[in-house]
Amino acid sequence: MDDQLNETDFVEPQDPVEIPINGVLDLHTFSPKDLPDLLDDYFEACRERDIYDLRIIHGKGKGILRDRVRAILSRHAQVQSFSEAPLEAGGWGATLVRLKDRSVEGKS
């Protein structure tokens, strides 16, 4: 057995990914296990910038990621509504989300 370590035995830690906060979130580069925290953080960052209409790009594939995203959206406290994107915005490969407005939250 060879006890020597190779360069490939070490995994470099990755730098945090900078996500532009512009209302469009492409999930292709993220792990599905990160979705709940990722969406939570992204929604809060958008609301801080008064961005309430979002497009989440999950891709078409088999629909597994889409279903997972929509399950999270259906129970998320900051989500007012969501729907499939129109064809020109990604069709069933993207979901449009309307966040609750912070300025009217808590008012009756």
Image (spheres, rainbow, N blue to C red):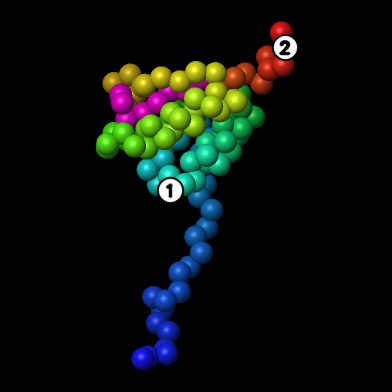
Residue at x 40%, y 47% (from the top left corner): 29
Using the rendered view, name the quadrant where residue 69 is placed. Answer: top left
Dominant secondary structure, magenta: strand
Rendering coords of residue 78 (x, y %): 59, 25
Q: Quadrant of the N terminus?
A: bottom left
Give the residue pinned by disc 2: 107
Report helix, strand or loop for mark 1.
Answer: loop
Q: Amino acid at mark 1?
A: Ser
Residue at x 72%, y 16% (from the top left corner): 106
Q: Amino acid at mark 2?
A: Lys
First reached walking from the N terminus: tag 2 or tag 1 = 1
Q: Which residues are magenta?
A: 91-98
Residue at x 49%, y 28% (from the top left corner): 73
Give the residue pinned by disc 1: 31
Q: Is residue 14 above or below residue 3?
A: above
Residue lying farthest to the right in this orientation: 107
